[in-house]
Amino acid sequence: MIEKILKIEGMNCSSCSMHVEKTVKKLNGTLEANVNLATEKLKIKYDSSKLNMEDIVIAVNKAGYKVVKDSQPERDVVDSLSKRFITSAIFAIPLLVISMGHMFGYSLPEFIAPEFSPRTFAISQLLLTTPIMIIGWNFFKVGTKTLLKGAPNMDSLIAIGTSTGYLYGLFAVYQIFNGNLSYIHQLYFESSATILMLITLGKHLESMSKGKTSEAIKKLIELVPKTARIERVSKELIVPLEEVKVGDIVIIKPGDKVPVDGVVVEGSTSIDESMLTGESIPVEKIVGSSIIGASINKNGFVKYRATKVGKDTALAQIIKLVEEAQGSKAPIAKMADIISGYFVPIVMVLAILSGLAWYIGTGDLIFAMTIFISVLVIACPCALGLATPTAIMIGTGKGAEYGVLIKSGEALETAHKIQTIIFDKTGTITEGKPKITDILVEGKFSKDEILIFAASAEKGSEHPLGDAIVKAAEEKDLELKPVESFKAIPGYGIEVEIEEKYILLGNYKLMTERNVELKNLKEVSNRLAEEGKTPMYIAIDQKIAGVIAVADTIKKNSKKAIEVLHRMGIEVAMITGDNERTAYAIANQVGIDRVFAEVLPKDKATEVKRLQNEGKKVAMVGDGINDAPALAQADIGIAIGSGTDVAIESADIVLMRSDLMDVSTAIKLSRETIKNIKQNLFWAFGYNILGIPVAMGILYIFGGPLLSPMIAGGAMSISSASVITNALRLKRFKPENGEKI
């Protein structure tokens, strides 16, 4: 399977994007296709044994659109539309004065007045309208092409409406030149010209608004320096960033931006990584330390070996993730897509039927044509197509600003439905850096001997509790013993052999399973657990030798984060492998509602499923490899950014700065985005539901006003801009902690 993201040129409304999507989905070998109107991108997954890129490009071209390698910069698009609008206005304003000045009491000079010079009056309007038609040629080119291919779009509506008015105007000019002066008041040029001018203005406003939606990506890209200082053949060179290769020795001096990811090989410094991690305190770097590209060197001089360059750097991966999220489609968009697919053909049928009905009823061709054109130009599939993707672009971009990476539109939508959030304990609610608090002995071994055996056993372990035991032994300069055999028992502990002694180190379940009598240490360990400490039993040659108590500190924001979630009406649960007493002690400190204790790593996903079976939408927050199945099982998986790659890969949302306050930020952002999308869809649907009947003359039947084609064109343009402007209100979103990365 191959996945590609292609830029599509020529799409102007949701009918366009739906047509491209349907065309590509029909190709043999397409596994998945998704077109985003706001980003103008096609995301496609396909079987390369059945389909190749050339076939896809040909299919898109046949549909009337074009796959482009490098899209026109947004600023150029805005400038081009601005020039088109200004030029159109230069011709349209005098045209309106000539054609409609008399309606406002303005008298034209005799050489152009209709009663004195009818031919000059007519030909001047034609000469002023024709340049505007040429400026708007793209509407006719795209609209006609898609109409002939049986997939009409917004441009088709505009092309039919304005060309009808223009062609009728040409007919009227012909009649005037043949002496039929009754056609002086039946020229229709000003409607066609004004419609095109106003729609160009709408497109200009739309493109300016679109430019603002992608600021998050621009800010991330701006973090990357353009050049790098590297060492080659004992020479210091400054090269373009693209020329840095894996293995190059990169030099960074005080104040430099770090160009690529790598590992320090010489020197020491402190580096500001806040733009990526949100951690305001500079991080000390020595030989062997990892360095992240786009961070800022503070005061030292170091050399480091490049390990990841180009698209593989941490920042490039973040940018890719945000871009993919902005280009993805939320389930709520499907309704708008389905309607948009039928929208333009229905509007064309309504325009024809209403025009015919009025002609039959009144016998007035001009009146019927006014109705026909008004219906065509007031319909706005653009507003429908932009309602969802624009809000998602801004929502995911806003999340990135605050260190919340939302991987897809689907995740963004689902997050607002979350009713219960399960937090893993170690490394999520707690720091994951526990320390030994107590060592209690039973029998002939001293505390130091117990610590030596335990630390020797845990030397090869990656578990945070084991790491705490090893560090405690190292701090006391105790000499560790060689391990003759080692076996990890997930969820229970470990069994090892040291100096021909058989040692068990683990929890109560391990001791019970191996029939080790705990004597009075059971009561002691219960007391330790009630204090929020994790007791670990050690047995030597099947006899209990002692208890080592380890405590993990709670993250500073854990309690506050849970309080915020409670205020949002969300139930909070905690899952841990710790015994119940320890788990409840921690839960009580931070205000957890439900506790799942003594859960084996493989059973975490089962507990998530159990909550889902209660009918709840569940989010899981974790940071370890053993959290990955649970993250995948949950309706929304939230990975702590400092966690493992596996956890991050399995998650739907990644918290870059490992701050639990960002969990509420993700949920609030989802709620605000979905509310914004619903508002957009309401206005887009409401506009069309109200506007089209008015354009058809429903109010006029009952003595109300008739909608002129010019007003209809202006209203259509404003509707698209208003939907984007409403989406831009999301940029005001500010979370509880209010700090950008």
Image: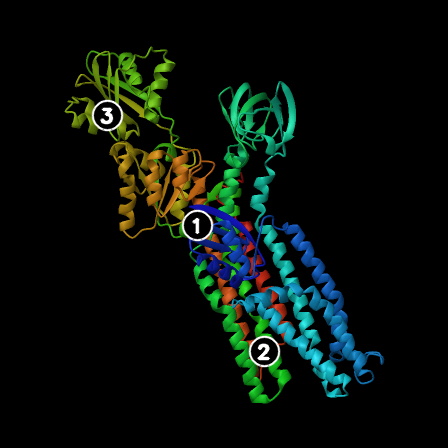
Amino acid beneath label 1: Tyr
Label 1 element class: strand
Say whether disc 2 or disc 1 marks the residue closer to the N-terminus. 1
Label of residue 372 in the image: 2
Q: Is residue 629 above or below residue 143?
A: above
Amino acid beneath label 2: Phe
Q: Residues within 10 Å of mark 3 (few under 14, many from 20)?
A: many
Amino acid beneath label 3: Ser
Q: Nearer the viewer, residue 552 or 28?
A: 28
Alpha carbon of mark 1 to alpha carbon of mark 3: how far? 58 Å
539 relative position to 164: left or right: left
Q: How is the image coloured?
A: rainbow
Label of residue 525 in the image: 3
Q: Which residue is mark 1?
A: 46
Alpha carbon of mark 3 to alpha carbon of mark 2: how far? 84 Å
Say whether disc 1 or disc 3 marks the residue closer to the N-terminus. 1
Report if residue 738 is visible in the image: no
Query: Residue 711: x, y in percent?
Result: 63, 72
Q: Is residue 33 above or below residue 223?
A: below
Q: Is residue 187 above or below residue 246?
A: below
Quadrant hosting residue 83: bottom right
406 relative position to 633: left or right: right
Query: Residue 314: x, y in percent?
Result: 50, 35
Q: Disc 3 vs disc 2: which is toward the camera?
A: 2
Quadrant hosting residue 645: top left
Label 2 element class: helix
Alpha carbon of mark 2 to alpha carbon of mark 1: how far? 43 Å
Q: Nearer the viewer, residue 339 or 413?
A: 339
Label of residue 694 in the image: none
Label 3 element class: helix
Q: Is residue 609 above or below residue 525?
A: below
Query: Residue 76: x, y in percent?
Result: 67, 52
